[in-house]
Amino acid sequence: MEYFDVKTMKAGVLQKIDDETWFHSQDGTDSRRVEEGEWLLPYEAFKEFLLAIRSSTPALQQNCSNVATELQQNCSSVTADTQQRCSNVTAELQHENSTKNARDYKRPQPTAKELCTMYADEVRFLTDKKNIKSLSKGVYGSINDLPKSCPRYIVESMNALNMRRKDGKPWTVETVSPLIAAIKINKKPSWFKVLYLICFAVFVSVSITRLFFSSDVSHETNEIKTEQTTETIDKEFVLNILKQNKIQLTDYRINLILSKKYKNTEELKQEILFQFEEMKKVMTK
């Protein structure tokens, strides 16, 4: 069905593309998305309406040169009547279009990721830095430098490579710009990726810290064993004290205790308790 665009005074057809309504003129010079509130009248009804107005004013056309005042009054009346009828038709069309959109609103708009998947060839072309630099002669280095309104020479290059939209029509500045915006959105890292990188960095940092800590402790133990030249206490004696106090220590802690010299048994018990507390601190980290 053909429609008449009151704004551009051109006749054309409407086409539904991905939940968007597009108007294409008959002469092929106008192709754009229909915005809310525009006047698009059924072409046949509009022609009949104009013919009815023209046939109803023959006397007016014959006597217009002699009766200028009457002509102005009649023209004003016809204009007012035309505007009123156009307003009524526009209101009906808007109501019908709103009702149809409400019924057809079943599928959500494609996401940035889905749009990039639909036009994979175009995405590869636009994300190639060499293409952008060559076409813009160095003005733009990559797709990230392109403005919101895509340069026309890039659109023309895409059409020259036989890239077409899903409806088979060539690309325009108005239709390529949303695709570029979708590519930029899709390239941004997701929260999951950011969180994963943070966790990975923390894991690496903790691993490196533990590695150096273990190396320092081992080195310290070796120094203690080397420097201690006095006679060490009996291991069985230490194990009996641990058993009496219901304490368990690692071999590392027991070796530390055995490597030291003590004045009496009480000092030995204090060292055992100290090593036990130190072991618990390390285990809770």
Image (cartoon, rainbow, N blue to C red):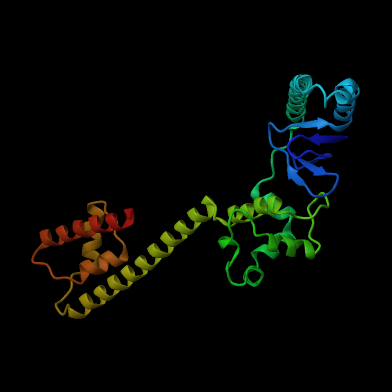
Q: Residue furthest front?
A: 66
Whether residue 202 sits left or right of residue 36 in the image: it is left
User: How many marks do you count on the picture?
Assistant: 0
Could you say which quadrant of the image residue 54 lies in?
top right
The answer to whether residue 64 is above or below residue 24 is above
Measured as percent of width and height from the top left, residue 188 is found at 55, 55
The residue closer to the viewer here, 273 or 198, is 198
The answer to whether residue 213 is above or below residue 183 is below
The residue that appears at 59% across and 72% down in the rendered structure is: 138
Measured as percent of width and height from the top left, residue 270 is found at 15, 58
Whether residue 114 sits left or right of residue 277 in the image: it is right
The residue closer to the viewer here, 79 or 102, is 79
The residue that appears at 67% across and 53% down in the rendered structure is: 179
Whether residue 250 sits left or right of residue 107 in the image: it is left
The answer to whether residue 200 is above or below residue 258 is above
Whether residue 261 sits left or right of residue 194 in the image: it is left
